[in-house]
Image: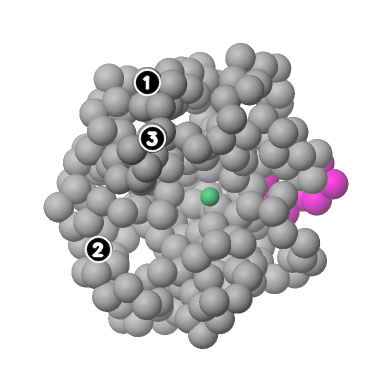
Amino acid sequence: MIDTHAHLDKILCDTRGEVDKIILASSDFESSKYNLKLAQKHDFLLPAIGIHPQSPVGGIDELENLMDKNIVAIGECGLDYSDENYDKETQLVIFKKQIELAQKYKLPLIIHARKAVDETIEVLKEYKNITGVFHCYAGGVKRIKKVIDLNFNFGIDGNLTYEDGLVSVVKNIPKDRLVLETDCPYLTPLPFRGQENKPAYIKYIYQKVSEIWETSFSDTEKIVDGNAKRLFWNKP
Ligand SMILES: [Zn+2]
């Protein structure tokens, strides 16, 4: 199992042996530096660097200085219009700088798009030769084709275990476009909803996808992990 989106800078837990790989999503410059260091100590941790649209923007121009060969993605970055007081113009500037970084270093983007999926799609359309994942995809069935046309993938989280609307979303996502993520410490799946999330709980999301696809757990794992590997690193 691969957890393609975890915030290990925000929780204290021993994840060794629980999953095969974990991609460390970053939220700001400090967490990017922290995650890089953490990943240096453990082979199964793969770092992404980036600045979340709700985070302080400090370090955006220094982000490139952190670039090294172990980095598997840029993010999480994107647009978040969930609060009307957010500075949309600044968000856009910070997001575009990170898209350009991803383009330059040929890295996938981990996209955070909250109450701004259409706007995010419009921005991404302006760029060529980019790919990535809509982390915690919230665009519904009707935007699936648009995301595919952008050459992007879908990240699905623990809320799949309790939000019925997401079941039809997963049914409509082509099997080769789906990756799974905990977003821990947030979005804890059933049966642990309400407690702090951790990478080990990713198995409940795999289980739910198996049910929806009507495939065995190991076949589901083969497909989903193959997608993650193709997207984030090109090793068999
Ligand atoms: Zn996240």
Secondary structure type for disc 1? helix
Q: Is the shortest distance between ligand 1 and the CB of mark 1 under 8 Å? A: no
Q: Earlier in the sequence, mark 1 or mark 2?
A: 1
Query: Can you give x and y, in whole percent of width and height, for residue 56 in the image?
Result: 59, 30
Q: Is residue 37 left or right of residue 144?
A: right
Query: Can you give x and y, in whole percent of width and height, for residue 205 in the image?
Result: 46, 72
Query: Can you give x and y, in whole percent of width and height, for residue 227 in the image?
Result: 44, 53
Distance in Å between CA atoms under marks 3 and 1: 11 Å
Residue 123 in sight here: yes
Q: What color scheme is it?
A: one colour
Magenta stretch holds residue 132: no
Q: Is residue 158 above or below residue 22?
A: below
The residue lying toward the viewer, choosing from 4 and 116, is: 116
**Classed neighbour count for the residue bearing mark 1: other residues with Cα under 10 Å, few (<14), some (14–19), many (≥20):** few
Q: Residue at x 80, y 39 (%)?
A: 37
Q: Nearer the viewer, mark 3 or mark 1?
A: 3
Q: Which residue is mark 2?
A: 169
Q: Which residues are magenta?
A: 40-46
Q: Earlier in the sequence, mark 3 or mark 2?
A: 3
**Classed neighbour count for the residue bearing mark 3: other residues with Cα under 10 Å, few (<14), some (14–19), many (≥20):** few
Distance in Å between CA atoms under marks 3 and 2: 30 Å
Q: Residue at x 61, y 62 (%)?
A: 185
Secondary structure type for disc 3? loop
Q: Is residue 40 above or below residue 8?
A: above
Q: Which residue is mark 3?
A: 85
Distance in Å between CA atoms under marks 1 and 2: 31 Å
Amino acid, disc 3: Asn
Amino acid, disc 2: Val
Residue 2 in sight here: no
Q: Residue at x 29, y 67 (%)?
A: 166
Give the numbered dot on residue 89: 1
Q: Is residue 35 left or right of residue 145?
A: right
